[in-house]
Image (tube, grey):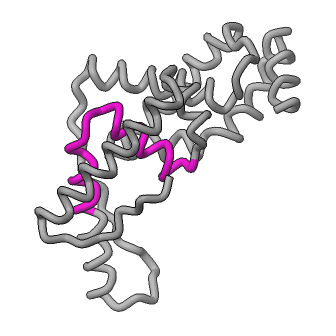
Protein backbone atom coordinates (compact mmCIF):
# COMPACT_ATOMS: atom_id res chain seq x y z
CA UNK A 1 0.00 0.00 0.00
CA UNK A 2 2.76 2.46 0.88
CA UNK A 3 4.51 1.65 -2.39
CA UNK A 4 1.30 2.44 -4.30
CA UNK A 5 0.90 5.73 -2.42
CA UNK A 6 4.48 6.65 -3.35
CA UNK A 7 3.75 5.95 -7.03
CA UNK A 8 0.51 7.93 -6.87
CA UNK A 9 2.33 10.91 -5.40
CA UNK A 10 4.98 10.66 -8.12
CA UNK A 11 2.33 10.51 -10.83
CA UNK A 12 0.43 13.46 -9.40
CA UNK A 13 3.72 15.38 -9.20
CA UNK A 14 4.13 14.95 -12.95
CA UNK A 15 6.25 11.77 -13.17
CA UNK A 16 4.00 9.97 -15.62
CA UNK A 17 6.45 7.06 -15.93
CA UNK A 18 5.56 5.92 -12.41
CA UNK A 19 2.13 4.87 -13.72
CA UNK A 20 3.70 1.82 -15.36
CA UNK A 21 4.14 0.30 -11.89
CA UNK A 22 0.41 0.60 -11.23
CA UNK A 23 -0.41 -0.86 -14.64
CA UNK A 24 1.99 -3.79 -14.19
CA UNK A 25 0.55 -4.65 -10.79
CA UNK A 26 -3.12 -4.57 -11.80
CA UNK A 27 -3.28 -5.37 -15.52
CA UNK A 28 -3.61 -9.16 -15.18
CA UNK A 29 -6.24 -9.32 -12.43
CA UNK A 30 -8.26 -6.50 -14.02
CA UNK A 31 -8.03 -8.15 -17.44
CA UNK A 32 -9.30 -11.42 -15.94
CA UNK A 33 -12.24 -9.61 -14.35
CA UNK A 34 -13.12 -7.70 -17.51
CA UNK A 35 -12.75 -10.85 -19.62
CA UNK A 36 -15.25 -12.62 -17.38
CA UNK A 37 -17.60 -9.65 -17.77
CA UNK A 38 -17.35 -9.51 -21.57
CA UNK A 39 -16.40 -13.08 -22.49
CA UNK A 40 -14.53 -11.58 -25.41
CA UNK A 41 -10.70 -11.26 -25.27
CA UNK A 42 -10.47 -8.35 -27.74
CA UNK A 43 -13.23 -6.38 -26.04
CA UNK A 44 -11.65 -7.07 -22.64
CA UNK A 45 -8.27 -5.85 -23.86
CA UNK A 46 -9.77 -2.67 -25.32
CA UNK A 47 -11.78 -1.95 -22.18
CA UNK A 48 -8.76 -2.62 -19.98
CA UNK A 49 -6.71 -0.01 -21.85
CA UNK A 50 -9.55 2.49 -21.65
CA UNK A 51 -10.09 1.70 -17.96
CA UNK A 52 -6.43 2.43 -17.20
CA UNK A 53 -6.82 5.80 -18.92
CA UNK A 54 -9.89 6.47 -16.77
CA UNK A 55 -8.00 5.43 -13.62
CA UNK A 56 -5.15 7.76 -14.56
CA UNK A 57 -7.58 10.64 -15.06
CA UNK A 58 -9.27 9.92 -11.72
CA UNK A 59 -6.07 9.33 -9.71
CA UNK A 60 -6.29 12.71 -8.01
CA UNK A 61 -9.66 11.67 -6.55
CA UNK A 62 -8.23 8.71 -4.62
CA UNK A 63 -8.60 9.81 -0.99
CA UNK A 64 -6.56 7.01 0.65
CA UNK A 65 -9.46 6.13 2.98
CA UNK A 66 -9.93 2.62 1.59
CA UNK A 67 -7.49 0.31 -0.10
CA UNK A 68 -6.10 1.39 -3.46
CA UNK A 69 -6.89 -2.07 -4.81
CA UNK A 70 -10.59 -1.59 -4.07
CA UNK A 71 -10.53 1.89 -5.52
CA UNK A 72 -8.84 0.92 -8.80
CA UNK A 73 -11.20 -2.05 -9.24
CA UNK A 74 -14.22 0.17 -8.58
CA UNK A 75 -13.12 2.79 -11.13
CA UNK A 76 -12.22 0.18 -13.78
CA UNK A 77 -15.30 -2.00 -13.30
CA UNK A 78 -17.69 0.96 -13.22
CA UNK A 79 -16.10 2.30 -16.40
CA UNK A 80 -16.44 -1.07 -18.12
CA UNK A 81 -20.04 -1.52 -17.01
CA UNK A 82 -20.88 1.93 -18.36
CA UNK A 83 -19.22 1.15 -21.68
CA UNK A 84 -20.93 -2.23 -21.95
CA UNK A 85 -24.31 -0.60 -21.33
CA UNK A 86 -23.64 2.19 -23.83
CA UNK A 87 -22.31 0.01 -26.60
CA UNK A 88 -24.47 -3.03 -25.77
CA UNK A 89 -21.58 -5.37 -26.50
CA UNK A 90 -22.44 -8.85 -27.55
CA UNK A 91 -20.55 -11.32 -25.45
CA UNK A 92 -19.03 -14.45 -26.86
CA UNK A 93 -18.29 -17.64 -25.06
CA UNK A 94 -14.63 -18.32 -24.38
CA UNK A 95 -13.42 -21.73 -25.37
CA UNK A 96 -11.95 -23.40 -22.30
CA UNK A 97 -9.78 -26.00 -23.93
CA UNK A 98 -6.63 -26.80 -22.10
CA UNK A 99 -3.98 -26.44 -24.80
CA UNK A 100 -0.93 -28.57 -24.28
CA UNK A 101 -2.67 -30.51 -21.54
CA UNK A 102 -1.73 -34.09 -20.79
CA UNK A 103 -5.36 -34.84 -20.01
CA UNK A 104 -7.29 -37.22 -22.23
CA UNK A 105 -9.56 -35.42 -24.74
CA UNK A 106 -12.74 -36.68 -23.08
CA UNK A 107 -11.67 -35.18 -19.72
CA UNK A 108 -10.91 -31.84 -21.39
CA UNK A 109 -14.30 -32.00 -23.14
CA UNK A 110 -16.11 -32.64 -19.84
CA UNK A 111 -14.20 -29.81 -18.13
CA UNK A 112 -15.10 -27.45 -20.97
CA UNK A 113 -18.75 -28.46 -20.77
CA UNK A 114 -18.76 -27.94 -17.00
CA UNK A 115 -17.21 -24.48 -17.41
CA UNK A 116 -19.76 -23.52 -20.06
CA UNK A 117 -22.65 -24.67 -17.88
CA UNK A 118 -21.35 -22.77 -14.87
CA UNK A 119 -20.84 -19.62 -16.97
CA UNK A 120 -24.35 -20.00 -18.34
CA UNK A 121 -25.80 -20.28 -14.84
CA UNK A 122 -23.77 -17.35 -13.52
CA UNK A 123 -24.86 -15.20 -16.48
CA UNK A 124 -28.51 -15.59 -15.41
CA UNK A 125 -27.83 -13.84 -12.10
CA UNK A 126 -28.65 -10.15 -11.65
CA UNK A 127 -25.68 -7.93 -12.54
CA UNK A 128 -24.73 -6.97 -8.98
CA UNK A 129 -24.91 -10.55 -7.67
CA UNK A 130 -22.88 -11.76 -10.65
CA UNK A 131 -20.26 -9.07 -10.02
CA UNK A 132 -20.01 -9.88 -6.30
CA UNK A 133 -19.63 -13.59 -7.08
CA UNK A 134 -16.94 -12.83 -9.66
CA UNK A 135 -15.02 -10.49 -7.36
CA UNK A 136 -15.18 -12.92 -4.44
CA UNK A 137 -14.29 -16.18 -6.15
CA UNK A 138 -12.53 -15.30 -9.41
CA UNK A 139 -10.55 -12.38 -7.98
CA UNK A 140 -10.42 -13.60 -4.39
CA UNK A 141 -11.31 -10.21 -2.94
CA UNK A 142 -12.44 -9.93 0.67
CA UNK A 143 -15.96 -8.88 1.62
CA UNK A 144 -14.57 -5.55 2.83
CA UNK A 145 -12.80 -4.93 -0.51
CA UNK A 146 -15.98 -5.78 -2.42
CA UNK A 147 -17.99 -3.50 -0.14
CA UNK A 148 -15.59 -0.60 -0.77
CA UNK A 149 -15.39 -1.30 -4.47
CA UNK A 150 -19.11 -1.45 -5.11
CA UNK A 151 -19.94 1.17 -2.49
CA UNK A 152 -22.43 -1.08 -0.68
CA UNK A 153 -22.56 -2.24 2.92
CA UNK A 154 -20.76 -5.34 4.14
CA UNK A 155 -24.17 -6.83 5.01
CA UNK A 156 -25.35 -6.27 1.43
CA UNK A 157 -22.25 -8.02 0.10
CA UNK A 158 -22.89 -11.04 2.33
CA UNK A 159 -26.61 -11.15 1.55
CA UNK A 160 -26.19 -10.80 -2.21
CA UNK A 161 -23.45 -13.42 -2.28
CA UNK A 162 -25.63 -15.77 -0.26
CA UNK A 163 -28.58 -15.19 -2.61
CA UNK A 164 -26.39 -15.68 -5.69
CA UNK A 165 -25.05 -19.00 -4.40
CA UNK A 166 -28.55 -20.11 -3.40
CA UNK A 167 -29.82 -19.36 -6.93
CA UNK A 168 -26.90 -21.24 -8.45
CA UNK A 169 -27.55 -24.28 -6.24
CA UNK A 170 -31.21 -24.21 -7.28
CA UNK A 171 -30.24 -23.98 -10.97
CA UNK A 172 -27.78 -26.83 -10.56
CA UNK A 173 -30.41 -29.09 -9.02
CA UNK A 174 -33.07 -28.16 -11.58
CA UNK A 175 -30.70 -28.57 -14.52
CA UNK A 176 -29.45 -31.96 -13.45
CA UNK A 177 -25.90 -30.75 -12.87
CA UNK A 178 -24.61 -31.45 -9.41
CA UNK A 179 -21.51 -29.33 -9.23
CA UNK A 180 -20.32 -28.21 -5.84
CA UNK A 181 -21.63 -24.71 -5.18
CA UNK A 182 -20.03 -24.25 -1.81
CA UNK A 183 -21.68 -22.76 1.29
CA UNK A 184 -18.33 -21.27 2.30
CA UNK A 185 -17.90 -17.51 2.11
Residue at point 48%, 51% (across, down) = 138
Residue 50 visible somewhere in the drawing: no
Residue 174 located left or right of residue 164:
left
Residue at point 71%, 28% (across, down) = 67
Residue at point 47%, 28% (across, down) = 77
Q: Nearer the viewer, residue 136 or 55?
A: 136
Query: In terms of image quadrants, where is residue 123?
Result: top left
Residue 178 located left or right of residue 60:
left
- Residue 11, horizontal then vertical, whole percent: 80, 16
Q: Nearer the viewer, residue 91 or 168?
A: 168
- Residue 1, horizontal then vertical, whole percent: 81, 32
Query: In terms of image quadrants, where is residue 27?
Result: top right
Q: Main secondary structure of the magenta part?
A: helix
Instruction: State the count of labels.
Output: 0
Residue 119 part of the magenta-drawn span: yes
Magenta span of residues:
116-140
> Vertical placement of 54 versus 166: above or below?
above
- Residue 48, horizontal then vertical, whole percent: 50, 33
> Vertical placement of 121 versus 110: above or below?
above
Q: Nearer the viewer, residue 57 or 163?
A: 163
> Vertical placement of 68 versus 129: above or below?
above
Residue at point 44%, 29% (across, down) = 156
> Vertical placement of 9 versus 112: above or below?
above
Residue 178 visible somewhere in the drawing: yes
Residue 132 part of the magenta-drawn span: yes
Amino acid sequence: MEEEIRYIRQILAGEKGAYIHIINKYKNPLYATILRMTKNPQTAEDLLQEAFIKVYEQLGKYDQKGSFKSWIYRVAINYCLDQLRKKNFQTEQIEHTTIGSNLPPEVVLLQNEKSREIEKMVSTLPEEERMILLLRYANELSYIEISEMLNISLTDVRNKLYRAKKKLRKNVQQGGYFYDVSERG
